[in-house]
Image: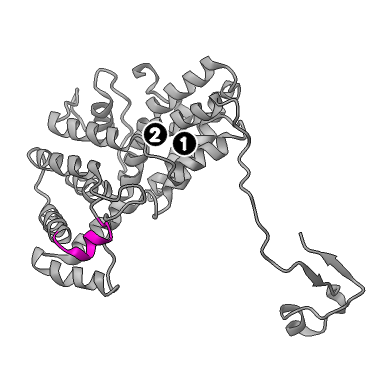
């Protein structure tokens, strides 16, 4: 995989055409989609070797695209991959290398990022994963299918949850304000971000792992006081029957943003970093779908719930705007049956 971390120079030129303040997730979306034009042979999805190479290329190149987007936003020159480093270490190098001859990532930060990558790699049929499988069912090239996953992850209801957690913690300000905040949640005046999950009806095991590694990161970075608010908020919520009965427990997004912020990564990059490990999950799902002999093109059933019979009045025979926007006049001899 380390032999495929570099991207074509024209990809770098493409990124340079974006505005200085372009959202890095939009840049990543464009970059992944553009890869399909550099590897036209990827359209041969029936070729096992081509499928394998596409998987390797995407898992190897997405960190490079992500780092280039970050450096573009920061107004810094792009840093090429260093294939002597580990997967997360190489990404840290492409993000933060300045003038040093050799970037040496802090092993505590490198390990924490590796843990985050493993925990985010794949997780059931969420919005972006379903998008990849649905688009891939049309037998499009894998780069385009994964670009669909990036687009779905771009949405704030999917990939931006950890950013919402940080905003919530800042609004709380201090642990002393937590009781009032939780009462506001009960009164439906506040939203408890980073709690609850469609799959987990108890504590998300990923959240506990991330919380423990957050303190290791703080040993190598500046201490993030938001961790104090987060841990106290978790403690009080888990001691409150209101939240326990509703199965509202911390999920994977509750602590991850605190780690990214400690690394001085802008919030716009949080979802981009999420997309790096999730690429392996998307590719695995795409490959599984194409290996399934029973897979057909995605076509969800649509049930028509409108009127069965409607009277039609040609537009040139309608009288005034209120006649056009209101219920159509009845003309029994000119009917057509609904779809």
Is residue 237 visible in the rendered image? The answer is yes
Q: Position of residue 275 (x, y in %)?
A: 37, 39
Q: Which residues fall within the magenta stretch?
A: 239-248
Q: Position of residue 60 (x, y in %)?
A: 38, 25
Q: Quadrant of the N terminus?
A: top left
Instruction: Report which quarter residue 334 is drawn in.
Output: bottom right
Residue indicated by mark 1: 31
Q: Residue furthest right?
A: 333
User: Which of 121 and 93 lies nearest the eye of the viewer?
Assistant: 121
Q: Quadrant of the C terminus?
A: bottom right
User: Which of 249 and 326 lies nearest the eye of the viewer?
Assistant: 249
Q: Are marks 2 and 1 in contact (CB under 8 Å)?
A: yes
Residue visible at 35% across and 32% down? 63
Q: Position of residue 2 (x, y in %)?
A: 34, 18
Q: CA distance from mark 2 to mark 1?
A: 7 Å
Residue visible at 28% across and 32% down? 118
Instruction: Report which quarter residue 61 is drawn in.
Output: top left
The mark nearer the N terminus, 2 or 1, is 1
Residue visible at 82% across and 84% down? 319
Is residue 97 visible in the rendered image? The answer is no
At label 2, counting other C-alpha atoms closer than 10 Å, the crowd grade (few under 14, some 14-19, many 20 or more) is many
Q: Under tag 1, what secondary structure? A: helix
User: Which of the labelled discs sits on residue 65, or is there none?
Assistant: 2
Reply yes or no: does residue 243 show up in magenta.
Answer: yes
Left or right: 230, with 44 as reference point: left
Reply yes or no: does residue 162 show up in magenta.
Answer: no
């Amino acid at each position: 995989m380390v032999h495929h971390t570099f991207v074509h120079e024209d990809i770098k030129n493409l990124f340079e055409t974006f505005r200085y303040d372009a959202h890095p997730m939009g840049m990543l979306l464009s970059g992944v989609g553009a890869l399909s034009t550099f590897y036209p042979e990827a359209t041969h999805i029936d070729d096992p070797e081509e499928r394998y190479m596409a998987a390797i290329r995407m898992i190897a190149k997405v960190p490079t695209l992500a780092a280039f987007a970050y450096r573009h936003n920061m107004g810094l020159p792009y840093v090429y991959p260093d294939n002597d480093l580990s997967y997360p270490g190489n990404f840290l190098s492409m993000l933060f290398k300045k003038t040093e001859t050799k970037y040496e990532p802090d092993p505590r930060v490198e390990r924490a990022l590796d843990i985050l990558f493993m925990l985010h790699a794949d997780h059931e049929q969420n919005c972006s994963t379903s998008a990849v499988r649905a688009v891939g069912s049309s037998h499009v090239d894998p780069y385009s299918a994964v670009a669909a996953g990036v687009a779905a992850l771009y949405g704030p209801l999917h990939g931006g949850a950890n950013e919402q957690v940080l905003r919530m913690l800042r609004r709380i300000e201090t642990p002393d304000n937590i009781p009032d905040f939780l009462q506001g949640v009960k009164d439906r005046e506040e939203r408890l971000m980073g709690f609850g999950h469609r799959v987990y009806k108890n504590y998300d095991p990923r959240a506990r792992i991330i919380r423990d590694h957050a303190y290791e990161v703080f040993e190598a970075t500046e201490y993030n006081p938001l961790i104090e608010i987060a841990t106290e908020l978790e403690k009080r919520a888990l001691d409150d029957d209101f939240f326990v009965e509703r199965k509202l427990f911390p999920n994977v997004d509750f602590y991850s943003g605190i780690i990214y912020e400690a690394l001085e990564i802008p919030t716009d990059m949080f979802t981009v970093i999420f997309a790096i490990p999730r690429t392996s999950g998307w590719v695995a799902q795409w490959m599984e779908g194409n290996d399934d002999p029973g897979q057909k093109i995605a076509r969800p059933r649509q049930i028509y719930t409108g009127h069965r019979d409607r009277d039609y009045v040609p537009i040139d025979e309608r009288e005034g705007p209120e006649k056009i926007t209101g219920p159509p006049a009845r003309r029994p001899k000119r009917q057509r049956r609904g779809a």
